[in-house]
Image (cartoon, grey):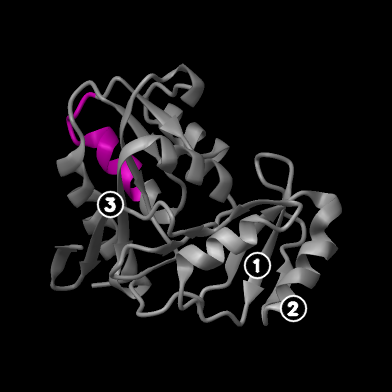
Amino acid sequence: MGALENKQRAAVAALRYVRRDMILGVGTGSTVNCFIDALATGGIHIKAAVASSEATRARLTHAGITVMDLNDVSELALYIDGADEATRRRHLIKGGGGALTREKIVAEAAMQFVCIIDGTKLVDTLGAFPLPLEVIPMARTLVAQRLTAIGGNAVWRRNFTTDNGNLVLDVHGLSIADPPALEAALNQIPGVVTVGLFAQRPADLLLVATDEGVSEI
């Protein structure tokens, strides 16, 4: 069974946590696209969704699902999203698709964060996948210099602008032994909008799909 099939298995497994008439936060990425497709055909009528990106908003709308602004939602019970890397402590690297800021906002607002991944994304130590940072354009060089000082190689993701109008630096060469501490430190660099570490607010539940089935962490 291939990666796509396992992404689909994780997506379908996440439907167990969706309740009728709830307002649901929805992330961004290929595994989440599988989830949106499963939600659209799964027979569960939700009241609305909060999208973490314009791409997700478009896919939800195309599926006939009402999309609400987070500012208009009094309670967000559940957020479903994927990850680029995850550990068994449910610390994540996210932002490969560039939606990390809105993803982190929706995750923070949700009472429960369920992260859906295929087994290739589960790692012992974060950092093999380059760590994304969303930065204000004028701070690109400054932030890159600060990252070089801690041993990272920050590569500007050229020809890409986030939904918020900012840039993304992908940081290579890090082995992240203490994700919450690094997240806190990088957040203090002037010009950093969001760090793609989801460790201070980790996922509450990981659904990990492999050829053997879907496990919960």
Label 1 and label 2: CA atoms lie apart by: 15 Å
SS class of the residue under badge 1? Answer: strand
Q: Residues within 10 Å of mark 3 (few under 14, many from 20)?
A: some
Residue 42 in view, yes or no: yes
Give residue 36's position: percent from left, percent from top: 34, 40
Q: Residues within 10 Å of mark 1 (few under 14, many from 20)?
A: many
Q: Is residue 131 above or below residue 43?
A: below
Which portion, as a residue range, is magenta?
34-45
Q: Residues within 10 Å of mark 2 (few under 14, many from 20)?
A: few
Name the residue: 19% across, 36% down.
Answer: 42
Q: The N terminus is located in which quarter?
A: bottom left
Q: Are marks 1 and 2 in contact (CB under 8 Å)?
A: no
Name the residue: 43% across, 41% down.
Answer: 108
6 and 206: which is toward the camera = 206
Q: The C terminus is located in which quarter?
A: bottom left
Q: Amino acid at mark 3?
A: Asp
Name the residue: 73% across, 47% down.
Answer: 166
Residue that mark 3 sits on: 204
